[in-house]
Image (cartoon, rainbow, N blue to C red):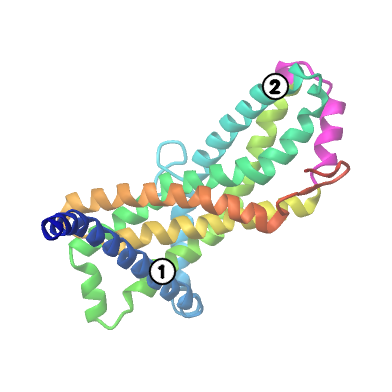
């Protein structure tokens, strides 16, 4: 009796073990890919700087008009403005219920800077720029253009992936600052104009909890998320298989993976930059 039972269990567990092994192999392949991309940064800056400049312009402003085409500035600003408005609406309402509505300015300076704006910028880059990278590289892969570059002794990984990561790194700086400004403006409009709070009270608490170094650290978080998004989407595009259908599946997998990693990296980077018990300027240590 024991032998048939063991054989049955082995047959049931074998597919799961195979899936687990494929998952570990995929994770190892991605990690190796990311290391190779980072190692090629100095060479790409020297040899492909013109291509990097073209990519920066493409990421920031797109290939058509800002409103119709597709630059990322309008997308990031619109998403940040809407989410900042939501923070103003729900944050003010929640604080007002406990008699702390004057702290709405502090909430804006804290939440928008440390959490909301970097995550919104990362998701916008994943949805707008990252999927474009996946589609571009996937189309090149199935059309054998990447193989042609390798055949011409052009290192395709450096030329196609590392340059895109560098371009996203530089392009995200003005994009993120525009989005951060939009979230600040939206929250203040909702709290002061729509809900009638004193502008002086709002500005006092806003500046109280927003030292300049917080903006710098917030930008660092946005840069980390941008690098993660770019490398994930480029990996799935660079390794796409199966024709146009495979490119579509690769874009979907890349978007899901990047969003999950954005959330995980957001928590880890927050702990790394501000600690588990962050110190709030003018208010001591929050525990």
Please tell me which residue lies in front, 56 or 193: 193
Would you identify the image quadrant in which residue 219 lies? bottom right
Q: Is residue 265 above or below residue 33?
A: above
Question: Is 195 within the magenta?
Answer: yes
Residue 114 coordinates in the image, percent (x, y): 67, 46
Q: Is residue 15 magenta?
A: no
Q: Secondary structure at mark 1?
A: helix
Quadrant (top left/top right/bottom left/bottom right) for the N terminus: bottom left
Residue 31 numbered mark, or none: 1
Measuring 29% from the left and 60% from the top, which residue is drawn there? 20
Element type where label 2 sits in the image: helix
From the viewer's perspective, is residue 260 above or below residue 34?
above
Q: Position of residue 11 (x, y in %)?
A: 15, 57
Instruction: State which region is magenta.
Output: 193-210
Residue drawn at the location 62% of the way across and 27% of the way down? 85
Q: Distance from label 1 to label 2 (Cα)?
A: 43 Å
Q: Residue drawn 56% across and 38% down?
A: 77
Q: Residues within 10 Å of mark 2 (few under 14, many from 20)?
A: some
Q: Which x, y percent locates residue 226? A: 51, 56
Work out whether residue 51 can be spotted: no
Which residue position is annotated with label 2?
Answer: 94
Residue 55 in view here: yes
Say whether residue 266 is left or right of residue 196: left
* Residue 4 found in image quarter: bottom left
Q: Residues within 10 Å of mark 1 (few under 14, many from 20)?
A: few
């Amino acid at each position: 009796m024991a032998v048939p039972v063991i054989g049955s269990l082995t047959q049931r567990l074998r597919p799961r073990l195979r899936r687990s092994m494929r998952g570990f192999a995929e994770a190892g392949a991605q990690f190796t890919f990311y290391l190779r991309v980072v190692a090629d940064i100095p060479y790409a800056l020297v040899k492909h700087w013109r291509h990097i400049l073209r990519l920066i312009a493409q990421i920031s402003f797109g290939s058509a008009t800002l409103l119709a085409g597709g630059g990322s500035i309008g997308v990031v600003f619109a998403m940040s403005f809407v989410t900042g408005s939501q923070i103003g609406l729900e944050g003010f309402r929640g604080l007002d219920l406990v008699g702390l509505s004057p702290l709405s300015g502090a909430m804006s300076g804290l939440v928008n800077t440390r959490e909301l704006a970097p995550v919104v910028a990362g998701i916008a880059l994943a949805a707008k720029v990252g999927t474009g990278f996946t589609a571009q590289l996937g189309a090149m892969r199935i059309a054998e253009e990447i193989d042609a570059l390798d055949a011409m002794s052009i290192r395709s990984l450096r030329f196609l992936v590392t340059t895109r990561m560098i371009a996203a790194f530089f392009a995200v700086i003005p994009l993120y600052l525009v989005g951060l400004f939009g979230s600040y403006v939206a929250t203040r409009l909702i709290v002061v104009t729509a809900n009638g709070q004193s502008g002086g009270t709002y500005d006092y608490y806003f500046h109280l909890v927003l030292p300049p170094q917080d903006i710098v650290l917030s930008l660092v978080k946005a840069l980390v998320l941008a690098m993660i998004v770019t490398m994930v989407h480029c990996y799935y595009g660079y390794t796409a298989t199966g024709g146009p259908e495979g490119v579509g599946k690769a874009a979907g997998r890349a978007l899901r993976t990047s969003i999950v990693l954005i959330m995980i990296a957001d928590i880890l980077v927050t702990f790394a930059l501000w600690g588990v018990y962050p110190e709030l300027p003018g208010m001591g240590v929050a525990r």
